Image (cartoon, rainbow, N blue to C red):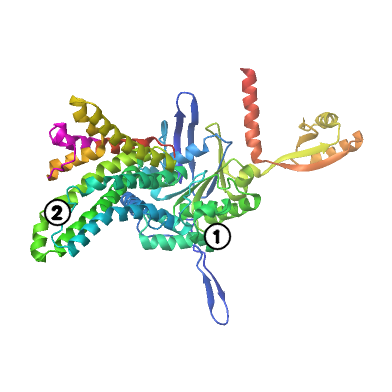
């Protein structure tokens, strides 16, 4: 049974706004990154998975349950951390998390026990008895995570969990998300517009852009070596590229860098000799890796082209 | 799911071992939608009286409750000291005379139940649990109606208990007073339902507590004032029907219809309408108010 599956999932708001466009995917348990620019459809996707927003067409299942017909069943087993503030100010973290545990269907004693457990996990100690209104943003974010975890969900949906945090707070939150996934074994979908964060905690990546699925694959496949050598020189990149092409290599210029295809080790000597012959100042010589950003850049470029063509 | 492995680490030492049990999952029952609704109902009922809240949140509800009970307590005390003294209040007109306190309670506490969930956006968390939007609306409305019922019931019970215990023959008096039980319980019900529906229908429409309180007071004051002024300043049909704008007149008419005992100063009979009309209007207030609250929560962004 896949963790989440979607078939031609589409959501339109009115005739002009398409939040999700024909999304078909299937993911297995793990820490799944859902990445896309603001407005790419991440939050809409999460709300559909919770059964809160009905899709315009298509279907989706979460833990084998249908999002349209079994919304309340799904929500018993899912924890949700919204993107925005969502905490009352006048109750303590202990009271609030335990209340949310009971809302999730835990008996009273279990709710109390689990509250103590998850508050310890997210790192709230003495302050948990004080009203939430006085908490820092980082502490509030921990309470939000705690209320999503209190009923031991099978799936966590985290919408921009590092929203509003300073760099240290971000690091701590990401570490928590990672531990929740690895130590607790709770499958998570982490929506973020920051690729760097996704890269750090996730094992699988879903990239969406303008409601369309760009790619779904294990994170490693995005960052493996590409077999391309990047040669950055002070000036004369064009001359170097010509020289290397003449020598039978695939080379193209990108700014001050010449990208050379390296199927084997032969190009290294050729590159060295060419730079020496031309008397160029070499700045950097590196093995290129895929970066997650390339995914979106390639998409932008193809979009520009299609605009030009039109 | 194969991901979960118990993270058990033990550090042996000469004196013993420290076990870090790591994260423990939960395999117990998940009680589902009904538990969610009842949790919300009881939590809301408590918050209507400021229970489990700061002392400041208790001042208004407990103050109003005290003012509402005080006359009943005084009546009982006077009867105890001066046997045979005339009692200024009966079950029939107690709430009629002190309705303003119930109205103030509605204005002050209806927003307590609904405003902060909207203002702090806790709604999106509630909706992410195993309940429907209409469940949330009905649980809140039901909790508030229950709070108003409790509020109105306490002084009636004080009168009831006073009359029984101060009688020369307590068992005899208890038997006599049992006849009044429909009034004792029924009048608070007839008060609680329409006032809860009306108050919540207004309060659910704004996340700003002060606006909600102001709007509810305005509705009660304006309806009573318009009803009274039109009743005095005009003649004929308008004068007769004008008092019906006041929800407390509707409530009294319904009470009169179902439980009997006419109050002299109430304009119910001057209207010339059959009493069931009041019942019908009260029912309409309850149903429309409930529909408005449910509709609001169907539409609200969260």
Please identify the residue farthest to the bottom as the structure is shown: B14
What residue sits 55% from the left and 34% below the top?
A40
The residue closer to the viewer here, A20 or B269, is: B269
Q: Is residue B11 magenta?
A: no
Q: Is residue A247 above or below residue B193?
A: above
Chain letter behind tag 1: A
Residue A224: x and y in percent read 66, 44
Q: Secondary structure at mark 2?
A: helix
SS class, disc 1: loop
Label 2 marks a residue whose chain is B
Counting every numbered tag in the picture gives 2
| Viewer-closest of A176 and A164 | A164
Q: Quadrant of the N terminus of chain B?
A: bottom left
The image position of residue A56, as x and y in percent, is 42, 30
**Toward which corner of the image does residue A112 lie, by quadrant?**
bottom left
Whether residue A145 sits left or right of residue A296 in the image: it is: left
- Magenta stretch, residue numbers: B261-284
Relative height, residue B191 to residue A261 (above, below): below
| Residue B68 position (above or below residue A273) | below
Q: Residues within 10 Å of mark 1 (few under 14, many from 20)?
A: some
* Direction top: furthest residue: A310
Whether tag 1 and tag 2 are in contact, CB under 8 A, the answer is no
Q: Look at 26% across and 48% down and name the residue there.
A: B98
Q: Which residue, given by chain and number where applicable, does mark 1 sit on? A: A123
Asked if residue B261 can be seen in this view, the reply is: yes
Q: State how far apart marks 1 and 2 are (Cα).
A: 55 Å
List x then y, in percent, for residue A242.
Answer: 83, 28
x then y, percent, for residue A159? 52, 44
The disc at residue B181 is 2
Magenta-colored stretch includes residue B271: yes
């Amino acid at each position: 049974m896949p963790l989440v599956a979607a078939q031609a999932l589409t959501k339109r708001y009115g005739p002009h706004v398409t939040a999700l466009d024909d999304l078909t995917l299937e993911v297995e348990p793990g820490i799944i990154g859902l990445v896309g620019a603001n407005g790419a459809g991440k939050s809409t996707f999460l709300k559909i998975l919770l059964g809160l927003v009905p899709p315009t067409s298509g279907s989706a299942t979460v833990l084998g349950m249908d999002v349209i017909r079994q919304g309340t069943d799904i929500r018993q087993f899912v924890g949700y951390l919204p993107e925005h503030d969502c905490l009352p100010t006048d109750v303590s973290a202990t009271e609030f998390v335990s209340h949310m545990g009971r809302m999730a269907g835990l008996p009273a004693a279990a709710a109390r026990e689990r509250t103590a457990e998850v508050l310890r996990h997210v790192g709230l100690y003495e302050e948990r008895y004080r009203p939430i209104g006085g908490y820092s943003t980082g502490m509030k974010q921990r309470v939000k995570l705690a209320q999503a975890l209190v009923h031991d969900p099978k799936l966590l949906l985290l919408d921009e969990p590092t929203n509003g945090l300073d760099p240290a707070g971000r690091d701590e939150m990401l570490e928590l998300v990672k531990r929740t996934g690895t130590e607790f074994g709770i499958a998570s979908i982490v929506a973020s517009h920051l690729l760097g964060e996704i890269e750090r905690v996730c094992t699988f990546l879903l990239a969406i852009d303008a409601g369309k699925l760009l790619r779904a694959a294990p994170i490693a496949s995005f960052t493996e070596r590409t077999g391309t050598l990047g040669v950055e020189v002070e000036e004369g990149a064009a001359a170097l590229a010509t020289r290397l092409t003449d020598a039978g290599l695939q080379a193209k210029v990108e700014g001050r860098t010449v990208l050379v295809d390296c199927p084997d080790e032969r190009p290294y000597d050729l590159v060295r000799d060419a730079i020496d012959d031309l008397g160029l100042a070499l700045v950097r010589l590196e093995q290129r890796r895929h970066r997650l950003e390339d995914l979106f850049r390639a998409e932008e470029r193809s979009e520009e082209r299609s605009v030009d063509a039109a | 799911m194969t991901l979960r492995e118990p993270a058990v680490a033990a550090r042996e030492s000469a004196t013993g071992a420290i076990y870090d049990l790591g994260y423990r999952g939960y395999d117990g029952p998940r009680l589902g939608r009904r538990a969610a609704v009842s949790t919300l109902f009881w939590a809301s009922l408590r918050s209507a009286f400021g229970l489990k809240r700061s002392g400041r949140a208790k001042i208004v509800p407990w103050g109003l409750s005290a003012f509402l009970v005080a006359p009943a307590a005084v009546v009982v005390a006077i009867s105890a000291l001066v046997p045979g003294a005339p009692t200024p209040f009966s079950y029939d007109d107690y709430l009629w005379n002190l309705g303003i306190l119930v109205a103030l309670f509605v204005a002050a506490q209806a927003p307590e139940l609904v405003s902060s969930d909207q203002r702090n956006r806790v709604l999106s968390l509630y909706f992410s649990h195993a309940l429907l939007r209409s469940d949330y609306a009905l649980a809140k409305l039901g909790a508030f109606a229950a709070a108003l019922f409790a509020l109105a019931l306490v002084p009636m019970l004080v009168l009831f208990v006073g009359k029984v215990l101060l009688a020369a023959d307590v068992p005899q008096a208890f038997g006599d007073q049992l006849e009044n039980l429909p009034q004792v319980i029924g009048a608070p019900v007839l008060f609680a339902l329409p006032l809860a529906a009306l108050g919540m229908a207004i309060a659910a429409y704004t996340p700003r507590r002060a606006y909600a309180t102001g709007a509810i007071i305005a509705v009660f004051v304006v309806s009573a004032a318009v009803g009274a002024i039109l009743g005095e300043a005009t003649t004929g049909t308008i004068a007769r029907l004008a008092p019906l704008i006041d929800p407390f007149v509707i409530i009294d008419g319904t009470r009169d219809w179902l439980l009997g005992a006419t109050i002299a100063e109430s304009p119910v009979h001057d209207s010339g309408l059959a009493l069931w009309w009041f019942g019908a209007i009260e029912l309409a207030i309850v149903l429309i108010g409930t529909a408005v609250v449910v509709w609001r929560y169907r539409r609200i962004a969260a």
